[in-house]
Image (tube, rainbow, N blue to C red):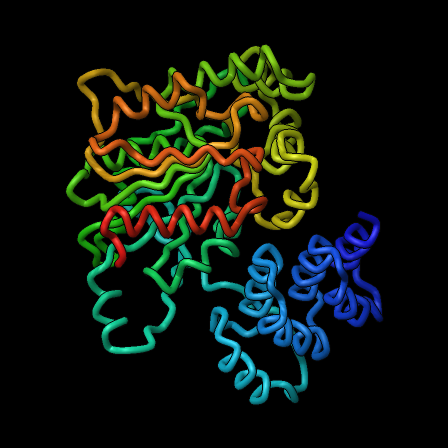
């Protein structure tokens, strides 16, 4: 834990010699230290650090580390060769003697769709063969919605691993102020316009030139994905919902469980989310996703929330959308739900009652409901190999990829 903390401190306040120390930390026996070192070498860019990252592409076996090796190299190189060792080595031979090194960053596109501002980053790994090119052209795209208060970087390092299957577009949603005109603080809290967001996603789909898309969403953004599938079933190839709730009723029950069983900090969070607490900017700062993640996460992975320290942004408060499933409401597209263990995480929508309602509200055969016992709500961080295995299995079972 001390070595990990030292690597993190170097990333946020570097001094001469830190890059060399971090390159050495890539040989640490503990994967958490190597993960933080590989993340930090993407911030403290040096010739020796890049050389060590290129070496790690072929040597590192732990996916939890390897995704950050790739993410750091991508940010430095401005290109992404995935796990292709040969192409990374060729790139290094061409560039190793350049006079200076710095972080390139992502090409984030900003545009309005139906009056809704969206920020997007699209990853399309180049096909290797003509057959790959033909398959990629006929497959739907995967749209990944960032959680509220986060940018595209929340999921990207992990989901980039799936980019050889299909094209991925990471979507950063507008803040409450951007989409409603209200700050999201004070006595009057607006409703986040889920229906309007679904319409904006369809405009984005049309611009991307795809007949159908898969939508992956996290937490409350699951309601945007569900609304999209209800409005545009023929344009929805599938849904992947991570730590989401079926509707407003399921969310209210989850808050009730957290209020009854949660810690003092979690009970305070419930008071803010239900309107029983103050909604000023200071409370909002404390309740922003990065702080809430720290409070709710599994203590086995306390570094997780810090890996995305630059990806959080002030979002504001919004009320739960009026989305309810009854016997007349049914989503007719393949769907995969990820849930943490509800016995460990009271906010989980993976209780027996939740799963029963989900199965009633989606088409037959029943949707995939994956309750991941070894995570506390951050499956892609804590169990990335299992997260990707389930995702790939769902895409294959649904006939989206071969």
Residue drawn where x is 57% and y is 37% of the image: 374
> As displayed, is residue 6 above or below residue 294?
below
Q: Quadrant of the C terminus?
A: bottom left
Residue 358 visible in the picture: yes
> As displayed, is residue 344 above or below residue 179?
above
Q: Is residue 131 left or right of residue 64?
A: left
> As displayed, is residue 77 above or below residue 318?
below
Q: Nearer the viewer, residue 355 or 235?
A: 355
Residue drawn where x is 48% and y is 37% of the image: 148
Q: Nearer the viewer, residue 44 or 295?
A: 295
Q: Position of residue 45 (x, y in %)?
A: 69, 71
Q: Is residue 327 left or right of residue 279?
A: left
Q: In which image quadrant can residue 279 be found?
A: top right
Q: Position of residue 228 (x, y in %)?
A: 26, 37
Residue drawn where x is 84% and y is 70% of the image: 16
Residue drawn where x is 61% and y is 23% of the image: 280
Residue 176 visible in the picture: no
Q: Position of residue 142 (x, y in %)?
A: 33, 52
Q: Position of residue 169 (x, y in %)?
A: 37, 55
């Amino acid at each position: 834990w001390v070595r990990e903390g030292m690597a993190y401190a170097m990333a946020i306040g570097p001094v001469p010699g830190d890059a060399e120390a971090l390159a050495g930390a890539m040989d640490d026996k503990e994967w958490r230290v190597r993960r933080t070192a590989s993340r930090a070498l993407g911030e403290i860019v040096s010739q020796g650090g890049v050389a060590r990252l290129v070496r790690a592409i072929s040597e590192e076996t732990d996916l939890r580390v390897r995704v950050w090796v790739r993410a750091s190299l991508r940010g430095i190189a401005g290109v992404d060769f995935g796990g292709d060792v040969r192409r990374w080595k060729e790139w290094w031979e061409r560039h190793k003697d350049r006079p200076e090194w710095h972080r390139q960053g992502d090409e984030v596109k900003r545009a309005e769709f139906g009056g809704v501002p969206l920020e997007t980053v699209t990853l399309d790994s180049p096909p290797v063969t003509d057959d790959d090119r033909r398959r990629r052209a006929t497959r739907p795209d995967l749209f990944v919605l960032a959680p509220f208060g986060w940018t595209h970087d929340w999921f990207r390092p992990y989901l980039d691993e799936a980019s050889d299957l299909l094209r991925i577009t990471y979507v950063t949603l507008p803040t409450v102020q951007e989409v409603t005109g209200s700050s999201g603080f004070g006595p009057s809290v607006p409703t986040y316009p889920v229906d309007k967001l679904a319409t904006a996603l369809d405009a984005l789909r049309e611009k991307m030139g795809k007949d159908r898309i898969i939508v992956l969403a996290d937490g409350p953004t699951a309601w945007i994905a569900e609304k999209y599938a209800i409005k545009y079933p023929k344009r929805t190839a599938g849904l992947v919902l991570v730590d989401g709730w079926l509707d407003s009723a399921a969310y209210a029950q989850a808050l009730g469980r957290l209020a009854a069983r949660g810690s003092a900090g979690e009970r305070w969070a419930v008071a803010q989310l239900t309107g029983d607490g103050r909604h000023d900017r200071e409370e909002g700062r404390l309740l922003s996703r990065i702080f809430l993640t720290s409070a709710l996460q599994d203590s086995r992975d306390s570094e997780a929330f810090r890996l995305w320290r630059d990806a959080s942004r002030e979002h504001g408060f919004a009320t739960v959308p009026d989305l309810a499933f009854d016997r007349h409401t049914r989503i007719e597209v393949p769907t995969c739900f990820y849930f943490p263990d509800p016995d460990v995480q009271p906010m989980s929508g993976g209780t027996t009652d939740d799963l029963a309602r989900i199965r009633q509200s989606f088409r037959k055969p029943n949707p995939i409901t994956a309750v991941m016992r070894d995570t506390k709500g951050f499956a892609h961080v804590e169990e990335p190999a299992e997260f990707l295995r389930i995702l790939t299995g769902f895409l294959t079972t649904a006939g989206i990829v071969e």
